[in-house]
């Protein structure tokens, strides 16, 4: 089984993906490194300080079985399950600011989380998508919850909509 863990920066992808891989005894794959090695970086957006990834090629990239793939574009990979980590936009802002991110990128990512970009894109491409709210979950608890869902073969749930949860920017 291949499990793609995606989401906006600041939602806990890397820590949750590493813990989930350990629980499942799967390989952990950093999508950024995989894209570098596979030659999928098509350029750099200097204004946004971001590498550009060819998502069409990413959709056809083969990943070996029994792997957890971590990255904010992991939902473009062909996988068996797509886990989209979500967090309240205020939590995303706080986490990114604590990491010293550029204010423009912080704002861009808070907006992306508010409108659910990763979740929407994943659901447009695939069926087995689950959103997990990591706003208050410790990474170990989030990984254990996802592990339990996978063991029970519960591969999808309703998307998280921050506006319905009372979030006001």
Image (spheres, helix red, strand yellow):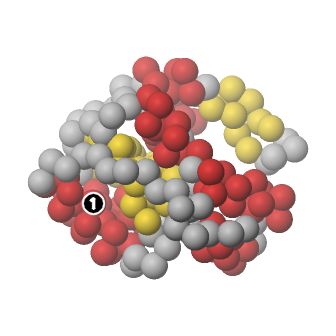
Q: Is residue 149 above or below residue 37?
A: below
Q: Write the residue at 75% across / 54% down.
A: 108
For the N terminus, the image quarter is top left
Q: Nearer the viewer, residue 160 or 61?
A: 160
Horizontal and vertical percent for residue 141? 31, 75
Within 10 Å of disc 1 (Cα), the crowding (few <14, some 14-19, many 20+) is many
Figure quadrant of the C terminus: bottom right
Of 60 and 37, nearer the camera is 60
| Residue beneath the point at 37% across and 50% down | 158
Identify the residue under disc 1: 146
Which residue is painted at 34% across and 69% down in the image? 142
- Residue 87 horizontal side relative to residue 141, left or right: right
Q: For this view, does 47 lie left or right of residue 82?
A: right
In the image as oriented, which residue stretches furthest toward the right?
A: 47
Residue 53: x and y in percent read: 63, 32
Rendered residue at 62%/69% (across/down): 167
């Amino acid at each position: 089984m291949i499990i793609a863990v995606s989401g906006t920066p600041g939602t806990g992808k890397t820590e949750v993906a590493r813990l989930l891989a350990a629980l499942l005894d799967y390989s952990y794959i950093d999508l950024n490194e995989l894209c570098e090695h596979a030659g999928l970086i098509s350029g750099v957006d200097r204004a946004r300080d971001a590498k550009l990834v060819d998502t069409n090629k990413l959709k056809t990239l083969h990943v070996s079985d029994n792997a957890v793939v971590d990255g904010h574009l992991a939902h473009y990979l062909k996988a068996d399950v797509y886990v989209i980590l979500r967090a309240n936009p205020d939590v995303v802002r706080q986490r990114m600011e604590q990491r010293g991110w550029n204010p423009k990128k912080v704002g861009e990512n808070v907006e992306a989380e508010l409108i659910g970009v990763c979740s929407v894109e994943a659901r447009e491409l695939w069926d087995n998508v689950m959103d997990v709210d990591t706003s208050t979950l410790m990474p170990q608890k989030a990984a254990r919850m996802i592990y339990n869902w996978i063991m029970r073969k519960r591969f999808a749930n309703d998307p998280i909509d921050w506006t319905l949860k009372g979030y006001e920017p």
